[in-house]
Image: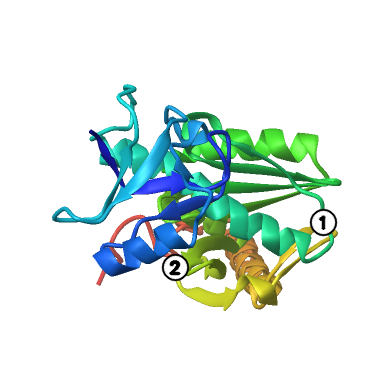
Amino acid sequence: MGELRWAVTDGPDGTAAVALPDDAAAARLLAEQAPGGFWCAREAGGCGGRLAVDADGARPAFVHAGTARCALVRREGAAERGYEPLRYRRPLVAWLAGQGLPPRVSTLPGRTGLHVALPGAVLEVQLAPVSDLAWRARDDRLHREARSVTWLHGPGADLAAATEAGVRGAALVLRRQNRGLLIGVRDAGGGVRWVRASACRVGPDGVEAPGLAEARAAHGRRAAARQDAARRAARQAARWSSRTGAVPWDVRTGTLPFPAAG
């Protein structure tokens, strides 16, 4: 029989994912707390079959009750990737429901994250690596389709988070904590300020998190200062070159193009 570390408790097509503890006593307790039993989730790429807890081996595991072949058996990496969106889905939906928001949640192709549609808004939860080019293309498309778009970058999407922080001054990152969620504000320098999801809300322009507006405003001020400095340098170069007998001046470095005589 194949072994799994993850299952769902609300039927073969369910999304209520649980992870089996490494401790045998904790695994048995989990089984007692789920009288309806466990299933191999189709939503995670599984077979939909019944699972049972085996806590007597070297490490507790979910085992298939029958002999049906399952694509996730003995492919722990594939199973973990398949169940990861489900493990974020329930706390995310609970957080939104607490704000009176009716989310429509779907799993992204390849089980790389979650797409959350709200009235006039989109939350894009990215849980797997995505290239800079692919992120920009999806971001452009989503902004054409919705009034506001918020990316929530999971543990596997650090590159996309860095790209967004560089473009907009800050990005939101997402992590699980026990049964809840943490949301972090990542600035353009790579620093992250973490808060519980309950400290954040969805507003007219997307997710509002403590420190997000300030980080983006600071980024805007730095960008404006760099533009001002470049314009001053260009004006200085123009004045210098207009003088009679002036030698060329490199506006990029502020130096003469050849060593000064002396």
Looking at the rendering, which quadrant does residue 74 occupy?
A: top left
Q: Is residue 37 left or right of residue 151?
A: left
Q: Amino acid type of disc 2?
A: Gly
Instruction: Specify the farthest residue to the left.
Output: 58
Query: Which is closer to the viewer, label 2 or label 1?
Result: 1
Q: Amino acid type of disc 1?
A: Leu
Quarter the N terminus occupies: top left
* In the image, residue 139 above or below residue 217: above
Q: Which residue is mark 2?
A: 190
Count how many numbered circles sit on residues in the image: 2
Q: Is residue 187 left or right of residue 62?
A: right
x then y, percent, for residue 54: 27, 50
- In-front residue for pair 223/60: 60
Q: Which residue is mark 1?
A: 101
The earlier-in-sequence mark between 2 and 1 is: 1
Question: Which residue does the image show at 74% across and 40% down from the upper left?
Answer: 143
Marks 2/1 in contact by CB < 8 Å: the verdict is no
Question: Which residue does the image show at 49% across and 64% down from the upper left?
Answer: 176
Crowding at mark 2 (Cα within 10 Å: few <14, some 14-19, many 20+) = some
x then y, percent, for residue 226: 59, 66
- Element carrying mark 1: loop
Quarter the C terminus occupies: bottom left
